[in-house]
Amino acid sequence: EIVLTQSPGTLSLSPGERATLSCRASQSISNNYLAWYQLKPGQSPRLLIYGASSRATGIPDRFSGSGSGTDFTLTINGLEPEDFAMYYCQPYGNSRAFGQGTQVEIK
Amino acid sequence: EAQLLESGGGLVQPGGSLRLSCVASGLTLSPYAMGWVRQAPGRGLEWITAITGSGDSTYYADSVQGRFTFSRDNSKNTLSLQMSSLRAEDTAIYYCAKGNSRSRPYYFDSWGQGTLVTVSS
């Protein structure tokens, strides 16, 4: 089972700044089968990125994913007020356990 | 607009059972793998189970293996999660999620609004 470690646990930023979230896997994720999700209080999770770098339908281009193997990054360029939320990474090959999440909060 | 709607949550005593359902509207589920993900109070997302589009294979997290059973009825476009021997640590919001393909690999591209399960005496 692949274990994902997300860092930092909390990211305190101001609107307009860039957020860089890390997701590190305990072993290589084949074919970049890694997804990122956003979760806000009282809402359902929302798919942002799949295949490590492909944006899901309707996701603004300020969200981008990168990385391969064991190191992956979600970048949010120019934080909007609605982007302050929890973010989770998840592999979707044979392993499916989510990372523990990164909270992006308003500074 | 395609939607997933969970139901069946509520308060149950430790050791009790509960059955969650997930129905789809505006969407045929049979071509897609499906899963359940939960979020306990103050905790992160936890994948707990998944089923292939045909229903011939199911997968479970260790935390629910042997206690939860995931099934689907494609003729009724519905899914069921039978939960037994419930524990306090099963208290969570349970989300039904749709995979983007029939079998692995798949990510969850659509989610229900969630149903709250509370295990307490």
Image (spheres, grey):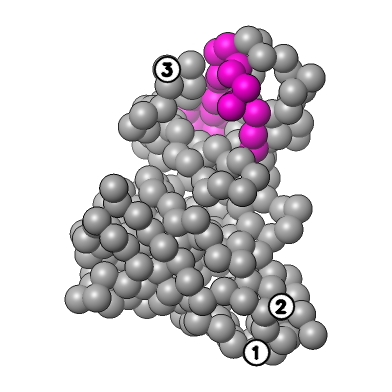
Three-letter residue code for mark 3: Asp
Find numbered disc 2 in the image and state the secondary structure of the residue it sits on.
Answer: strand
Other-residue count near label 2 (Cα within 10 Å), few / some / many at <14 / 14–19 / ≥20? many
Residues marked 2 and 1 touching at CB (< 8 Å): yes
Chain ID for label 3? A
Q: N-terminal of the two: label 2 or label 1?
A: 1
Residue A39 horizontal side relative to residue B108, left or right = right
Q: Residue furthest front?
A: B1
Per the model, the C-alpha gap separating discs 3 and 2 is 41 Å
Q: Nearer the viewer, residue A47 or A50?
A: A47
User: Which numbered tag is attached to residue B119?
Assistant: 2
Residue at image point 72% right, 14% down:
A14
Q: Nearer the viewer, residue A16 or A23?
A: A16
> Is the same chain shared between marks 3 and 2?
no
Percent x, y of residue A26: 61, 42
Residue A99 higher or lower than A63, as above or below: below
Find numbered disc 3 in the image and state the secondary structure of the residue it sits on.
Answer: loop
Residues marked 3 and 2 touching at CB (< 8 Å): no
Residue at image point 56% right, 83% down:
B18
User: Which numbered tag is attached to residue A61?
Assistant: 3
Per the model, the C-alpha gap separating discs 2 and 1 is 8 Å
Residues marked 1 and 3 touching at CB (< 8 Å): no
Q: Which residue is mark 1?
A: B16
